[in-house]
Amino acid sequence: SAVISQKPSRDICQRGTSLTIQCQVDSQVTMMFWYRQQPGQSLTLIATANQGSEATYESGFVIDKFPISRPNLTFSTLTVSNMSPEDSSIYLCSETKGAGGFDEQFFGPGTRLTVL
Amino acid sequence: TQLLEQSPQFLSIQEGENLTVYCNSSSVFSSLQWYRQEPGEGPVLLVTVVTGGEVKKLKRLTFQFGDARKDSSLHITAAQPGDTGLYLCAGPFSNFGNEKLTFGTGTRLTIIP
């Protein structure tokens, strides 16, 4: 199992502003992931954050909009930049104890973002 | 492109009834995982199936991996209100060496007491 915390748990933001979401895991891991879950929908991977290298973004997501930091093996941040109402979603981080991205993932509780 | 399609998308049944949720793909997967997500929480892994035709049981939940490893099903016997949640299948996907999980479209299950 794993203990993963996210801050903030929820926020309401104004259009055009930015929000940084923090993810803390309880043990050192190589791979961390950031997902978006739009209302009533499944999870969509935004990017993979590996310590010591640039994040790898999925199609449709760019670094300018979703900059990610991974300063050490237990912490990562995701920033949602220049927000619009379409960015209203739950943002989840996850990590895997396994050797690769195919293994079981442990998720944080999510950050519920509402953009007005 | 969503590689894993789940059906039904929504399901609402009475406590005590049985149900089956399906996860289908045109692609072959080396394994499939099933997660359950409750409101305000992240998904939690229920099971991983790795062999074609494999059947795994977790109390009242029975998971099956298709012989061709393109589909999976989740059967719940005598559903209880605690089974309410979003059920997600997930499979490994590799793109230019980047390993990740791709999640299915999800089935939102509501068990009515």
Image (cartoon, coloured by chain):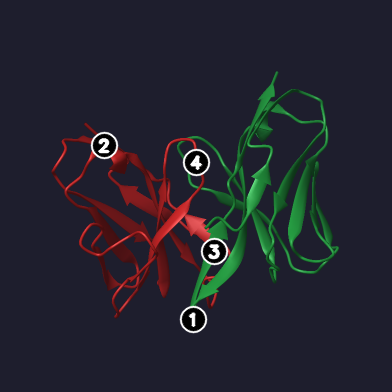
Chain colours: A red, B green
Judging by the rendered image, the residue that carries numbered circle 4 is A41
Identify residue for label 1: B97
Q: Chain of mark 2?
A: A
- Amino acid type, residue under disc 2 in the picture: Pro
Q: In percent of the image, x 40 and y 66: which residue is there? A: A32
Please name the residue that numbered disc 3 is placed on.
Answer: B101
Res. B26 image quadrant: bottom right
Q: Mark 3 belongs to which amino acid? A: Leu
Q: Nearer the viewer, mark 3 or mark 2?
A: 2
Instruction: Name which residue lies at 82% across and 31% down.
Output: B78
Q: Residues at badges 3 and 2 in contact (C-beta under 8 Å)?
A: no
Please state the total of marks drawn on the protein image: 4
Q: Position of residue A34 (x, y in %)?
A: 38, 58
Q: Earlier in the sequence, mark 4 or mark 2?
A: 4
| Mark number displayed over residue A85 | 2
Query: Badge 3, how many Cα within 10 Å: few under 14, some, many 20+?
Result: many
Question: Element under label 1?
Answer: loop
In the displayed structure image, the side of residue A103 where residue A16 appears, left or right: left
Q: Does label 4 lie on the same chain as label 1?
A: no
Whole-angstrom CA distance, mark 4 to mark 2, is 16 Å
User: Both on one chain, marks 3 and 1?
Assistant: yes
Inspect the image, locate mark 1, and give the three-letter code of the amino acid beneath it.
Answer: Gly
Contact, mark 1 vs mark 4 (Cβ under 8 Å): no
Compute the Cα span from label 3 to label 4.
16 Å
Label 4 environment density (alpha carbons within 10 Å; few <14, some 14–19, many ≥20): some
Q: Is residue B38 left or right of residue A77?
A: right
Residue B62: image location, x then y, percent: 81, 48
Quarter occupied by residue B82 = top right
User: Do badges 4 and 2 share one subunit?
Assistant: yes
Q: Chain of mark 1?
A: B
Which amino acid type is shown beneath numbered disc 4? Answer: Gln
